[in-house]
Image (spheres, grey):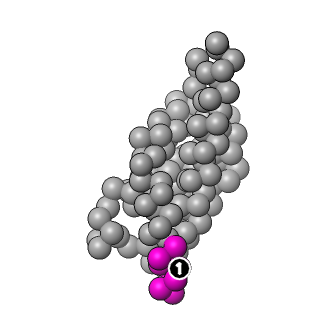
Amino acid sequence: PTRETPDDTVRLSPKGGHIQPQAELTEEERAEFFSRLDEIRPNAATLLEILNATNKVRRSTDDKAEAARLKLAMDDMATVLHMVHRKTKKLTIPGNGLLLVAWATGLVSSYKRSQTEVTEEAM
């Protein structure tokens, strides 16, 4: 089965690859952020797989604007992967950290759904 990057990868990329200043979150927002981050941690390998697939598409496209958009989405995925692998005590939450983690969760779900469909079609 062919693995492709979900269409949502670029369209839903929340920050466009730019480093955001540290967030000033309430305790409730911090708790929600770390809860969502804990939910995505088991899917770090899938997120890395999406990142690699996106990079493959980026390298193969002749459309410079599309390549730039894909690069921004890849930067967002790399930021989430960085947060996933950091210890909670050492993690600085970016200004849009909650949005990034929510985006990555949806991205992983969409990717897994698309892979299930590809697998079913191959049978």
Which quadrant holds the C terminus?
A: top right
Quadrant location of residue 17?
A: bottom right
Q: Decide: is 86 above or below 10.
A: below
Label 1: which secondary element = helix
Q: Nearer the viewer, residue 104 or 60?
A: 104
* Mark 1 residue type: Glu
Which quadrant holds the N terminus?
A: top right
- Image position, residue 53 (x, y; %): 52, 33
User: Which residues are drawn in magenta?
Assistant: 25-32
Q: Nearer the viewer, residue 112 or 20?
A: 112
Residue 47 in the magenta stretch? The answer is: no
**Residue located 65% across and 47% down the image:** 10
Q: Nearer the viewer, residue 123 or 8?
A: 123
- Image position, residue 51 (x, y; %): 49, 41
Which SS type dominates the magenta stretch?
helix
Q: Decide: is 27 above or below 32.
A: below
**Residue located 66% across and 20% down the image:** 120
Residue carrying label 1: 29
- Image position, residue 109 (x, y; %): 60, 45
Residue 8 shown left or right of residue 108 in the figure? right
Tag 1: Cα neighbours inside 10 Å, few (<14), some, or many (≥20)? few
Residue 30 in the magenta stretch? The answer is: yes
Residue 82 shown left or right of residue 35 in the figure? left
For the image shown, how many numbered marks are present on the structure?
Answer: 1
- Residue 66 shows up from this direction: no
**Residue located 60% across and 38% down the image:** 111
- Image position, residue 59 (x, y; %): 54, 31
Q: Decide: is 34 above or below 27.
A: above
Q: Decide: is 81 above or below 57.
A: below
